[in-house]
Structures are given as structure tokens and as C-alpha cells.
Amino acid sequence: MEKEKLIELVGVSKSYDGENVLKNLDLYIRDNEFITLLGPSGCGKTTTLRIIGGFVTPDTGRVIFEGKDITALPPNKRQLNTVFQKYALFPHMNVFENIAFGLRIQGVSEQEIKRRVSEMLEMVGLSGFEKRAVTQMSGGQQQRIAIARALVNKPRVLLLDEPLGALDFKMRQDMQYELKNIHKQAGITFIYVTHDQEEALTLSDTIAVMNQGIIQQIGTPEDIYNEPKNAFVADFIGDSNIIDGVMLHDYLVNIRGVDFPCVDAGFRREEPVDVVIRPEDVILTTPEKGQLQGVVTSLTFKGVHYEMDVEACGYEWLVHSTKMEPVGSHVGICVDPENIQIMHKPRSVDEEAAGVDE
Amino acid sequence: MNKKNLWLSGPYLVWIVGFILLPLVTIFYYGFTTAQGGFTFANIINAVTDSANLKAIGLTVLLAALATAICLLLGYPLALCLSRIGLKWQKAVIFLFILPMWMNFMLQMVAINVILEDNGIINTILTALGLEKVHIANTFGAILIGMVYDYFPFMLLPLYNTVSRLDGDLINASKDLGAGPLRTFFKITFPLSLPGLVSGATMVFIPAISDFAIAEMLGGGKIMLVGNIVEMSFTKGQYYQGSGLAILLMAFVIISSLITGEDGENEGGAMLP
Ligand SMILES: Nc1ncnc2c1ncn2[C@@H]1O[C@H](COP(=O)(O)OP(=O)(O)OP(=O)(O)O)[C@@H](O)[C@H]1O
Ligand SMILES: [Mg+2]
């Protein structure tokens, strides 16, 4: 059932000026999947992508492509193409020449070049712009040219480094939709870099969450959202309530003096843990029916739902609900056992970065 | 403009009239009149027909072109290398190359002479090695060396500015699309360096073509460039001939800076000397 590994990073490390940017990274990428490297600024996403593209040589470790070691292969010999963070379109060439660049290098016939470039322009919705100077195009248009320039070479893998970073909200949404379509049409592997968790959840088949040069968790968007492996992932993917708790025994956790049934087991007795609860999983009821009692301290309308802060047991609970409770009202809080995520507490900063989960 | 503040522009007006317009008018007056005061083209025509002048023009253009070419061949690879090393080192190397510009011009020339003389440093070394002496001092070669030495920073700076601002991802993109190092150079790096190359060439060629001081200091008075003939004409009181030649030189400078100006504008290189 599992598709073959197309690309594999084995024990890849990289440091700049003595600072470890990537720490013994292992990652494999399956054929045809849309995988996203997601993480905060400076966590090493671009560096990872550049190592796959061949622009950066890792200090240690290997890059495997279809079973062959390509660690030392220069970028021009690799069967992948890149859409750069700032597009990197050639300013001295017009739209047509930019897209035709790769084909010219391959020595494709002029007729064939014409055909394939117009095909690409049509796909990205820029037919008729052949003669335009790329410097006169808008950010969104430049981005689509960059994608066309890469895809026209029919690469096995497309690397995209925050390609939507420079676009406004509406444009981003349109382009996300287009990218998803292009991925389906082209039938190739996409390796996508972003620090926008919503974008990652929308687009990806697989998400690799990174922090400080280490992959924290890798899985489907549903896995990562519903079963974050540690507090970092939970916090980074969507809003979360991360509360100190104590594991009393299997299936029972004490949060701020109140016992909550849960579905996790295998912790030590009395072990301090991080309890993660998504804001949409916090149910507000009347004070008598609630497991906890609290007071609403703020209320914001967010379009689809209301966002409320509820002060209860010395913790400010973030709550998303379609029903609003006015500020100052007394409420009860309930959480279903399956919506409570229990995580080991990291014992040190390094371990926190590493996301060690015993 | 506010009339009350008009007097502020006074010093500049004096400057413009006294040091720019007046000399220009004088040159043009002498250039287009005969000794008797009548209008004539003879001075200009003479400037390009006199055989001594023709020889000087040929020599001047050749020297300026050679100096420009050598500065380019030395400067471009240097600028490319610089853009690949750490920023601190870049600044240090650039500083070293600019340093001589702050030294007095006469001192520079004297120093070059000391190096090139028949009994100078080069020949002392050659003799010590048991090799034959070379005669460079007071030749075409000495002037060429002096020009390259003196004008090299004017080539290096615009080149460095252009090359160091090239986005490294453009090079990466070219490689990404399958181009090897050679093709990447000719299709991306070189075309994108052109503005800097043109600026640098202009910045060297224009002062080189109107030079007379380097030729005088290093040519030992034996080699006459256009600038030297102009200077000599004026010191000998031949204002009419001198002005004719000066106008010709000016035309040359303006034309060459117009040709290159369009491309070089952005790098601040299209300035007239
Ligand atoms: N060429 C380089 N020289 C020195 N340090 C570098 C270099 N490239 C990256 N770094 C450092 O490596 C770390 C990771 O950089 P990287 O560009 O991979 O981060 P990123 O996850 O892509 O961040 P962003 O979301 O801001 O693009 C950063 O601390 C950065 O300063
Ligand atoms: Mg980045």
C-alpha cells in the first residue's frame, strides 16, 4: 500500500558559523505526494529545501533520489526544479524567454519550445503575455511565471519555497487552489515550504513540522491537527489551550485540581504533563453542569464562530463556539475525554526543540 | 522660487559663469575665429588634418582603449571573486584598491617612475636574477601602466556595485534549470553585469582620453597625446589651434559618454569628467 520513497534525507546536518541549523535530519518523500515543511522563521526549512535542490551541501548525511546517492550532484544534473522564495525570474528576459530557458538548455527544437511555453502560459492563465518584461508583472503574475518556468521542464519533483509569501490574502487563496490543481494535473511530487499553518493544512498530503532544525512530527494534516505529538506542534498548528496537569493514573488527569477522564495511558503515576485542548473542543454549559466553573472575560466575533476567553481555575481558556456568552457571565466548562491530549513535559530546552516523546 | 532667497544662489551663479560658462565661451570663441577675428572652421579642420595631431589622436584613442580593456580584464574577475567571499573581506579588499586614490597624484607618478626606471626596482630585480634589463620608463608602456594604475578604482567600483548586487538565486535558478557554470555565466551573470561594465569602461575611457598629466609625468615629454598638444598650444600662446583641438576632444568625450550613458545611468557612471 505504501508508495515508494522517491527522495530520502539520511542524517543530514548543516551548521553556519558554528550554529547548528539542521540537526541529524531524517525525512523521506513519497512519489507524487504534496509534502509541506512547516515551521517558524529560521527553523531551517529553506536550508532543507536547498539541500534537496543541490544549492547547499550538507555537512554530514546523504540525499538519496530513487535509491541513488545524489549528495554531491550539482543542481543542474538533478531532476527537480525550484520555485524560489522571491521567484528569481531573469530580469533581462521577457516572459517567453524566462519560461523557455530550461528547454533551450536541453536543446529542444524551437517549434517544440513555442508549443510547450504557450501550453504552460495557458495553464497559469497568462496567455498573451509572452513579450512582456517580467519586471512589469505583478507579484501574483511573477509567481505564476516562476511556476511555469519550473514545470515546463517536466521535473519529477517541484520545490516551492514560500511561493505565496508576497501575495495578498485573496490572491493567496486563489493561488492555493491553483497550486492544488496543478499538482493534480502534473502528477508530480511537490515539496512545499511555508510558515503558514493554514496553508499547510489546506494544501498538503503530508506535513513535516520543524523547529530549530529538527522535525517535530510528520503525518497527514488530520494527524497533526488532531494528534499533535508535543506542545510545540499543538501550539504551532492552530490555537490551543496548553495547561499544566498531573496524570493520576491511566485515563485520568488532574487539571488545576479537577479530575478529567481522558483516553491516554502509559504515563507514570503523578507525572506532570502538558494537557492540550483545542478551543473548539471546549464546551460551555451552565455552571452546574460544567466540570469547571468560570467567567467570560472577553468576546470577539470571528465570522464563523465566536472567540471567548474564560477565566477558570487560574487559567485563561480559549474557547471557540457558535453560541456566544456575554462578558461577565458565569459558565461551566466541559471537555469530552477523547478531546484531551496528554503530552510528556520536555525536561530541557534542547529536548523541547527535539520534541522527544520517550 | 522665493525672490528674497534668490541671493543664496549668488555664489553658484558666480561659479557657473566664472568657471564654466566663461572658459567654454572663450574656447569656442578662439576655436571658431581667425587671428584677424573672422569666423572660420580652419582651427577645427586643422585639428584633424595636421599629421602630428592625427598621430596624437590615434595614439590617444589607442592608449585610452588599451587602458580601459586592461582595467576591465583585471577588474571583472576581481569583482566576481569579491562577490563570493565574506562581506568583511570584500570591504577590506575594496578599501585596499581605493587607498592609492587618496595619495597625492605627483607622488603616485614619482613612485611609478622609481619602479620603472632603467635603474629602478624592476630592473634591479631583473639584473639580480641575471636577466636582461627592460626599458619601460618614458615609453608608451609606462603611460599605459600609469593609466591603469590611476584609473583602476573607477573601473572596480561600478563593477563591484553591480556584481555584488546580483541576486545569488538568479544563478541558482539558472543551474536549477539545467545550465552548467559556463552557460550560467554567459546567459545570466555576464548580461546582468553589463551596466557595471559599461559604467566602468566610461569612467576609465573618458579621463584617459583627455589625459595629459600622466603622459607628461611618465612619458618624459617624448610622447604627445591630444591633451599634451592642447596644453602645449596654450602655454605657447597658440590659442586658436589649441581651442580647435580642445573642442574636438570635448566632442569626443560627449559622444562617447552619450553612447554609453543610456546603459550606464543606474550605476552613476555616465558622468562627464
Ligand atoms: N548562507 C547562510 N549563512 C549563514 N547563515 C545562514 C545561511 N542560510 C541560513 N542561515 C541561518 O540558518 C538558519 C535557518 O535558515 P533557513 O533559511 O533555513 O530558515 P527558514 O526556516 O527558511 O526561515 P524563513 O521562514 O525565515 O525563511 C537561520 O538562523 C539563518 O540565519
Ligand atoms: Mg526560508
Image (cartoon, coloured by chain):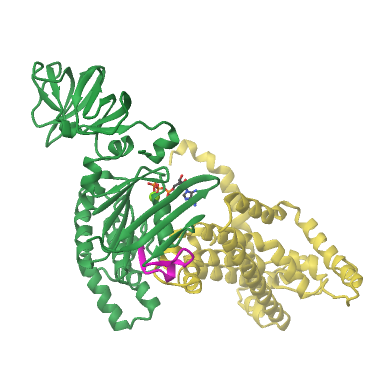
Chain colours: A green, B yellow
**Going by the image, does A82 lie left or right of A2?**
right
Q: Is residue A79 magenta?
A: yes
Residue in the image at 33% along x and 73% along y: A100
User: Quarter of the image containing the C terminus of chain B?
Assistant: bottom right
The residue nearer to you, when weighing B38 against A87, is A87
The residue nearer to you, when weighing B63 against A189, is A189
Q: Is residue A222 magenta?
A: no
- Residue A216 placement: quadrant: top left
**Going by the image, does B206 lie left or right of A311?**
right
Residue in the image at 38% along x and 65% along y: A65
Residue B273 seen in render: no
Magenta segment boundaries in residue numbering: A67-82
Q: Is residue A85 above or below residue B210?
A: above
Residue in the image at 60% along x and 56% along y: B20
Q: Position of residue A92 (x, y in %)?
A: 40, 67
User: Quarter of the image containing the N terminus of chain B?
Assistant: top left
Residue in the image at 9% along x and 32% along y: A322
Q: Position of residue A254 (x, y in %)?
A: 24, 22
